[in-house]
Image (spheres, rainbow, N blue to C red):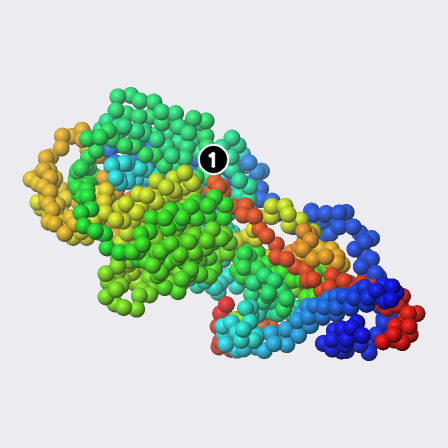
Amino acid sequence: MAEYMDNTTWQRPAGAYWFVLPALPTLIGAVLALLVISASPARAVPAAEIGAGHMQWHSDGSDSYQAALTQHSKLSVTIAGMVAVVQLEQRFENSTDSWQEGIYSFPLPPEAAVRQLEMQVGERRVLGKVRERQQAKKLYQEARVAGKKAALVEQQRANLFTNRIANIAPGEQVTVRLEYVQPASYVDGEFALRIPTTLTPRYIPGVSALRGLEDQTGAQAASLSVDQYLGWAKPTIRVPDADAVTPLLYPQTGSDFAPLNPMSIDVDLDAGMPLAEVQALYHEMALSRRGDRYQLTLLNGISEMDRDFELRWRPVTGAAPQAAFFTEQVAGQYYGLLMVVPPALVQEDEILPREQIFVIDTSGSMAGEPIEQARQSLKLALAQLRPQDYFNVIAFDSDTRALFNQAMPANRHYVAQASEFVRHLYAGGGTEMLPALERAFRNESSKEEQGAQRLRQVIFITDGAVANEQELFDAIQAQLGHSRLFTVGIGSAPNQWFMQGAADAGRGFSVQVSKIDQVSAQMGQLFERIAAPLAADLSVSWPQQVEAWPSRVADLYRGEPLLQSVHFGDALPAGELLVSGQLAGKFWQQRIALAPQPGGAEQPGVASLWAKRKIASLLSQLAISASEEDIRPAVLDVALTHQLLSPYTSFVAIEEKISRDVNAPLRSNALPNTRPRGQGAQPYAYPNTATTGPANAFLGCFALFIALLIYVMRRPEEDHVSKDS
Amino acid sequence: MFRRILEQPRHWLLVVALVVAVQQLLSAALVYSKAALAPVLMERAWQLTLADGGRSHKPWPWADTWPVARLQVPALGIDQFVLAGASGNALAFGPGLDAAGRSPGEPGTAVIAGHRDTHFRFLQHLQPAMTLQLELPDGRMLRYRVAGAEVVDSRDVVEAPAQFGPAQLELVTCFPFDALRAGGPLRYVVRAEPGAFVNTELERRAAVNNGVLEL
């Protein structure tokens, strides 16, 4: 009979079950009983009753961070021409009832020349001095132990500084004022001044250094030594100063109405030329005008320090300067700042096929709005590819993932594939940048001549939140080859030093996307400037012997000015200087008359800028050829002469009066920064952590039970059926 | 004749019910046997990894996961291999280290997820102050202290594991433990805080490195 035939066929694969069949009733009964028993706790406590947030048991460790000290910043910016002199005032308040030492890490523009420090307690003012770093630390430490009020400002990175203030009395306020000089950038006929106010947490690569082990084993007492910065990271082999560059952030997000770190901003802008437009990109400012001078102040008085401050101003058409020369006399010495814009050229001949490698950072620090901005930027980058171009997309966080094994032609198929890849990028994990860069610079094209004919461009989209900047600069310089590196800075508070340094080492330039609505303008500008001809082999010949920094002028992209800081000695030069170079393969030169300027036209800050540029140039040699022993004395000499902060020099201010009784305890506390706006709270999806095992077992037993029922009900008929057959 | 026609669907029902039963029971057997047998192969891969100074080794040639740590709970007699990734294909063979979190031992939170009905069934028995041990591929032994546990709803917005701060460990599994259906929204999260490094291990490494501690 047909049904019996079927029986044999389905029983064969699971033959083991066949002999169990006679015992099925008891077996199923037992299994079901077991299942019911084992499942009963779940029924007794319905899932709805134990809901989310229900604490089973909890430790008494507290997660909330209460700041013992608060800080209020005041930024006063005075811009004359293209040099800004900025006063940054930080007022610290101790709201606890014990003596406090405050440790506040704060960012400054990487090109800022910090030249003055002043500490004010009540009406008393103490002027700071520049000392060699270790010596400054020692002086501060002695003052701290002795109970004197003291402030110490150290440079941790070109754009990250630490301010320590010792012996703030309960309920007292101490104000620290810094003054620095910063050049405005001038690209494509527009001036910009960008000042960071907070930082994106830097990623610390590398394995723990030996010091980390000591900390792990619980030497908490050591945290009060002056070498401690109370950062969240432990030193690693690749970042030995990790604790100094990882300041704490408030866990909650900031707001402009009740700022965690309030800041007021005042700007006095004297551009020296008629302006068509003045705007602050990320802050609402009230603007007033007196003649050619503009005054800006925050509309609400204060704002949260959770995003960069950027001011842009554009001269009216025709007034945009093509060349400018500023001078300053300090201590009988003359210094100058030269700015020349090479004429922009229209592309004449066909642009060579390009090989564009897009590298996108998908690390945890990119979570939130930044990854949106990055994805959008990449989308635009893919859209501008031409069919004759080649491209690849590399995403990295803790691991590096390349879309293709080698650069692929930008035809519709591959571009669509890339768009799909980009759409599925999410932020999470570490920032292991080195392998990604190595992958990007690896020239995949097997045929040498084919590779040589294509322009190889690496477009690097990141927030630059890494602590091993110098290591990366070195790697870029070493591996660059024929490629050029362009950085796209993402987020409200990207690491400007990394963006600029990486672009310089990669002989490209950097653009900035801080808001989603800037993406198309910034990416458009990036690709236009990449495509435009370069000004190459530039040189400046001065009428007399001068010390000029940077000594070798890098190639300029369209709209970029040539900038050189010079030291003339004790007399201003007379005559004219000659700037020459190759513009799109044609020789170009320009003569600029150096008319000795009347007394009023002196530009304050030019001397500090020269010193800062010299320090920066010397330090960048450290990467290539020079050793630290050669560079350090040279940097120290400039920094001490010009009273500037540098990696080797710190500012220290000490009050002579002893204010704290040495027996009263002193506590050290870090002042947290505010999380960059738009960054963060990345929704996290828990993994799926249940198997279908129990459900399978239950369903299987249930089906067996049904089968048994059918079998039992059929039994009386069985004889009859078998007779029939 | 009429009776035979009645009988026919009954036979078919029997066939269908038995096929379903066998298929379901086999799937369940597959789930549990994968979970039970994989550690044998993982053990070998882990020994190779340790011997090779931390370079990952696959447990079988076509595997898409490999052991990245060894998790031990001495109080409960638990000894398991933590695999790379917390996706379904890894979790079938053992608890997995979620790539969204940090690596154990680095600042921030490391997240290890496991199935509630196989490897991580023991989470319900963890008590505060119990010791967890995590052996890393480079031979380091990290010790954690269980600090607390809570039930979270994965449908709510949950913040990503901290990328910095104290080096914490989170063990995640589904909740409730005895639920029948997979894919529920609740998770049972056990948090553990770093304890001291296990001294014996450090001493052993110190001896190997001529007294110089390297981590």
Indicate the amino acid at tag 1.
Answer: Glu
Asked whether A265 or A26 is in front, the reply is A26
* Residue at image location 64% in from the left, 47% down from the top: B155
Q: In which quarter of the image is the C terminus of chain A?
A: bottom right
Residue positioned most to the right: A716
Q: Mark 1 — residue?
A: A304
Q: In this view, does A55 lie to the left or right of A606?
A: right
Q: Residue furthest front?
A: B1
Residue A530 vertical placement versus B98 (above, below): above
For label 1, the crowd category at 10 Å Cα-Cα, with few meaning under 14, some 14 to 19 and many 20 or more, is many
Tell me: residue A343, above or below residue A232: above
Which residue is painted at 35% across and 56% down in the image? A411
Residue A343: image x %, image y %?
17, 41
Q: Residue at x 50, y 45 (%)?
A: A368
Q: In this rendering, would B144 be left or right of A157? A: right
Q: Quick check: can you spot residue A131? A: no
Quick check: A29 above or below A364? below
Work out whether residue A463 or residue B4 is closer to the camera in this orientation and state it.
B4
